[in-house]
């Protein structure tokens, strides 16, 4: 955000404020949700929680578990089996960069 603010000529505070007003979340919370979204879809595809945590930028598996519980109220394994998380092949291809 600081780099983007510098390139636009806005202060970091103004950038954060504008981001929040446009997106509805502070940048850090939005980044947490994006990271969680990528992680949970990898769990749906059958990747192990330890591998997903390592590849998704979590400090360790317990941090992934914490986010999954915070966002879904359940464990990573239970969340990955939820029908509302049915993977969309177009948005989450089984092969390629998102894997």
Image: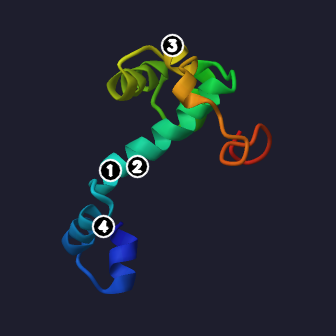
Using the numbered discs, state the Cα–Cα distance from disc 3 to disc 1 in whole angstroms.
Answer: 26 Å
Q: Can you say whether 1 is above or below 75 in the image?
A: below
Q: Give 73 or 38, whichever is nearer the viewer.
A: 73
Q: Secondary structure at mark 2?
A: helix
Q: Which mark is residue 22?
A: 4
Cα separation between marks 4 and 1: 14 Å
Q: Of discs 4 and 1, which sits in the foreground?
A: 4
Label 3, label 4: how far apart the Cα atoms are? 33 Å
Checking the image for residue 78, the label placed there is 3
Query: Mark 4 falls on what kind of element?
Result: helix
Mark 3 or mark 4: whose residue is earlier in sequence: 4
**Residue corresponding to mark 1:** 28
Whether label 1 touches label 2, CB < 8 Å: yes
**Label of residue 31 in the image:** 2
Q: Residues within 10 Å of mark 1 (few under 14, many from 20)?
A: few
Distance of label 2 from label 4 (alpha carbons): 15 Å
């Amino acid at each position: 955000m600081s780099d983007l603010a510098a390139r636009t000529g806005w202060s970091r505070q103004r950038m954060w404020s504008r981001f929040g007003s446009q997106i509805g979340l502070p940048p850090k919370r939005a980044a947490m949700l994006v990271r969680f979204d990528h992680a949970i879809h990898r769990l749906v595809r059958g990747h192990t929680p330890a591998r997903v945590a390592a590849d998704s930028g979590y400090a360790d598996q317990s941090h992934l578990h914490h986010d999954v519980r915070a966002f879904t109220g359940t464990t990573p394994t239970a969340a990955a089996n939820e029908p509302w998380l049915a993977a969309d092949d177009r948005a989450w291809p089984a092969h390629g960069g998102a894997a």
